[in-house]
Image (spheres, rainbow, N blue to C red):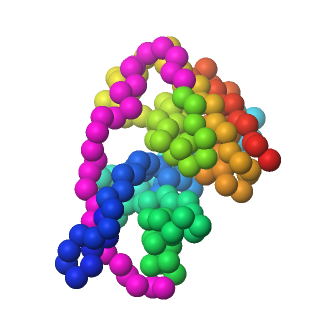
């Protein structure tokens, strides 16, 4: 990602991890749907199990994408410039290219461990959403064929505190379903 000024790319190039499920509408949809499944598992609202809103996930309808940025104002780097541009209502232009690199390359079976802290937890949020779709039986036939019954994702996350814990609500809701496919271990530093 790089800023555009007067039709030219300026400043340093920055690389970011895309996490589709962190877009506000998708994140809320996952959380609300997970809550519905938790209630059904408890025996309440069994008739009204919420399903994911498939219209939010159709790539051909996508007109934008979401960036999850942490405000680092002290360093005056890219994050600060983005927030300052937004606050000043500059309508700044940014050049985005991607995706680049390899995916997580997760195998379809076995136990997979991930350790992450702070905003680094975003790296594995789409994998967590993938597991959520498995656990809630929301996968289509193609996705379901990509994963075996013995697949398990164990996610060890550390945050400074609850306020800075991006994605933690969804992770806790997924863990509350007590599926054999997912385990969450949380450590808060504060």
The vertical placement of 108 against 127, above or below, is above
Q: Name the residue located 64 percent from the left edge and 36 percent from the top edge.
A: 157
- Residue placed most toward the observer, 21 or 124: 124
- Residue placed most toward the observer, 38 or 174: 174
Quadrant assignment for the N terminus: bottom left
* Residue 96 among those drawn in magenta: yes
Q: Is residue 171 left or right of residue 22?
A: right
The vertical placement of 131 against 2, above or below, is above
Q: Measured from the top left, where is residue 30 in percent x and y?
A: 55, 48
* Residue 115 among those drawn in magenta: no
Q: Main secondary structure of the magenta part?
A: loop
Q: Is residue 67 left or right of residue 156?
A: left
- Residue placed most toward the observer, 88 or 133: 88
Part of the protein shown in magenta = 88-113
Q: Name the residue located 59 percent from the left edge and 25 percent from the top edge.
A: 154
Q: Name the residue located 49 percent from the left edge and 58 percent from the top edge.
A: 68
- Residue at the extreme right: 190
Q: Measured from the top left, where is residue 79 in percent x and y?
A: 48, 65
Q: Measured from the top left, where is residue 165 in percent x and y?
A: 66, 50
């Amino acid at each position: 990602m790089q800023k555009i000024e007067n039709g030219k790319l300026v400043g340093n190039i920055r690389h970011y991890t895309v996490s589709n499920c962190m877009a506000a509408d998708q994140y809320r949809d996952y959380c609300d749907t997970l809550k519905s499944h938790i209630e059904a598992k408890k025996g309440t609202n069994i008739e009204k199990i919420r399903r994911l809103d498939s219209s939010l996930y159709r790539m051909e309808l996508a007109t934008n994408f979401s960036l999850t940025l942490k405000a680092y104002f002290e360093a005056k780097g890219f994050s600060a410039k983005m927030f300052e541009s937004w606050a000043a209502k500059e309508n700044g232009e940014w050049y985005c290219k991607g995706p680049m690199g390899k995916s997580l390359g997760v195998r379809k079976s076995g136990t997979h461990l991930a350790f992450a802290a702070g905003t680094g937890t975003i790296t594995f949020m789409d994998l967590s959403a993938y597991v959520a779709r498995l656990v809630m039986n929301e996968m289509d036939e193609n996705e379901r064929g990509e994963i075996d019954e013995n697949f398990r994702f164990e996610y060890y996350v550390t945050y400074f505190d609850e306020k800075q814990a991006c994605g933690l609500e969804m992770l806790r809701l997924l863990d509350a379903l007590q599926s054999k496919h997912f385990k969450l271990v949380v450590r808060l530093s504060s």
